[in-house]
Image (cartoon, helix red, strand yellow):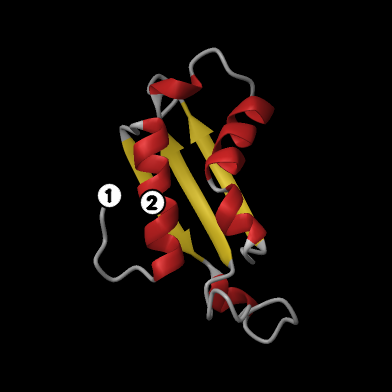
Amino acid sequence: MADQGKGPVAASIEKKLIEGLTPISLNVIDESHHHAGHGHAGDKRHGNESHFRVEVVSAAFEGKSRVERHRIVNGLLAQEIAEGVHALAIGAKTPGEG
């Protein structure tokens, strides 16, 4: 799960999801480079970290709908979203689905 090469926003996302969901697996992918040159890319507060894909498998999602799972992840990452993360793609599964 931990990757020393992550930028500060990716590291913060990873830390909050680990603390909030105790995932069996977690992959935080910075996809910002795909959006270079777009008006929202490179927000001053986040440098070049603006677009992420999160793939998380956690028992915390048991019995939850897809929308509820996304709300949980968005709630945990509310600060990052408020501070300029422009896009967050979420793949949230239970251990049985993972």
Q: Are marks 2 and 1 in contact (CB under 8 Å)?
A: yes
Find disc 2 in the rendering and name its residue.
Answer: 14
Residue sticking out furthest to the right: 39
Crowd around label 1: few <14 · some 14–19 · many ≥20 (10 Å) = few
> Mark 1 — residue?
1
Q: CA distance from mark 2 to mark 1?
A: 8 Å
Residue drawn at x 40%, y 28% as measured from the top left = 58
Disc 1 is placed on an element classified as loop
Image position, residue 70 (x, y; %): 62, 36
Task: State whether residue 37 is above or below residue 72.
Answer: below
Packing grade of label 2 (10 A; few <14, some 14-19, many >=20) is many
Q: Mark 1 or mark 2, which is nearer the start of the sequence?
A: 1
Would residue 46 appear left or right of 2 to someone viewing this image?
Answer: right
Q: Which mark is residue 97?
A: none
Q: Is residue 13 left or right of residue 79?
A: left
Residue beneath the point at 43% across and 62% down: 10
Q: Residue at x 59, y 69 (%)?
A: 50
Residue displayed at 31% across by 32% down: 24
